[in-house]
Image (cartoon, rainbow, N blue to C red):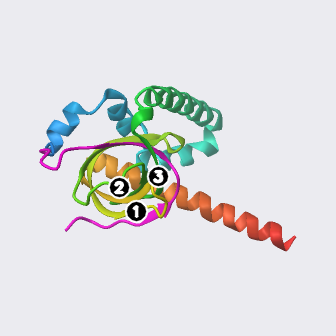
């Protein structure tokens, strides 16, 4: 059984490519080789190492200007990386998530895919400093009440690098934090 992580309701652009039922899922080493370079870069630059962020906070007291320059450069790198990743977003495969986490995602798809269908996934986390290229499998399909409406698909990851799992965990936490902050602001505004 795979690890279970919490997921959050959130809409993100993803590319979904359904694969034949007998498609041989690649081992992680092969996944790494077939992964487009911007996804590899995003996996390596989209995260701040825990020790690094602690040191930067400690330096902020003494070297505030240096920390600000480093943060500005990181923002520029993320902006450039976001641009590169948008070039890999295929409009014909684009879907939007309704829920995302480090073990599963939910998304609307124009077709009601069969349970067990393997998927190639590109998850664009540009606002959160990353992107993930992985494989998954359809676990649940909720058909639209409309005859030609999109289906709601629940998929779990079947091939996902550890660093990409960490990227999804961090993005989910950041999304949740932003949602909680927004709710708190809305409650405060209602009281005023």
> Could you tell me residue 146's position as x and y percent?
49, 60
Prevalent SS, magenta region: loop
First reached walking from the N terminus: tag 1 or tag 2: 2
> Could you tell me residue 118's position as x and y percent?
23, 50
Secondary structure under the numbered disc 1 in the rendered image: loop
First reached walking from the N terminus: tag 2 or tag 3: 2
Question: Is residue 5 one of those drawn in magenta?
Answer: yes
The residue tagged 3 is 171
> Could you tell me residue 71's position as x and y percent?
57, 35
Would you say 191 lies left or right of 8 here? right
Q: CA distance from mark 1 to mark 2?
A: 6 Å
Nearer to me, 116 or 44 = 116
As drawn, the residue found furthest toward the front would be 147
> Could you tell me residue 83's position as x and y percent?
50, 27
Residue visible at 12% across and 44% down in the picture? 24
> Are discs 1 and 2 less than 8 Å apart at CB?
yes
First reached walking from the N terminus: tag 3 or tag 1: 1
Residue 143 disc label: 1
Residue 112 disc label: 2
Q: Is residue 143 above or below residue 50?
A: below
- The label nearer to you, 3 versus 1, is 1
Q: Image quadrant of residue 46?
A: top left
Residue visible at 27% across and 65% down in the picture? 3
As drawn, the residue found furthest toward the right would be 192
Secondary structure under the numbered disc 3 in the rendered image: helix
Label 2 crowd (10 A; few <14 / some 14-19 / many >=20): some
Question: Is residue 112 one of those drawn in magenta?
Answer: no
Q: CA distance from mark 3 to mark 1?
A: 28 Å
* Residues drawn in magenta: 1-24
């Amino acid at each position: 059984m795979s690890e279970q992580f919490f997921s959050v309701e959130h809409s993100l652009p993803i590319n979904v490519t359904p694969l034949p039922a007998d498609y041989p899922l690649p081992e992680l080493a092969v996944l790494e080789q077939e992964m487009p370079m911007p996804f590899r870069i995003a996996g390596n630059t989209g995260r701040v190492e825990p020790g690094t962020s602690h040191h930067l906070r400690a330096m902020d007291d003494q070297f505030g200007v240096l920390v600000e320059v480093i943060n500005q450069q990181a923002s520029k790198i993320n902006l450039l990386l976001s641009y590169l990743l948008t070039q890999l977003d295929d409009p014909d495969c684009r879907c939007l998530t309704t829920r995302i986490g480090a073990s599963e995602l939910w998304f609307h798809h124009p077709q009601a895919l069969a349970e067990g269908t393997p998927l190639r996934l590109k998850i664009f986390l540009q606002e959160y400093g990353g992107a993930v290229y992985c494989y998954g499998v359809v676990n649940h399909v909720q058909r639209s009440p409309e005859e030609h409406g999109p289906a709601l698909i629940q998929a779990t990851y079947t091939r996902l690098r550890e660093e990409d799992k960490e990227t999804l965990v961090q993005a989910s936490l950041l999304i949740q934090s932003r949602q909680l902050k927004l709710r708190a602001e809305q409650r405060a505004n209602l009281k005023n």
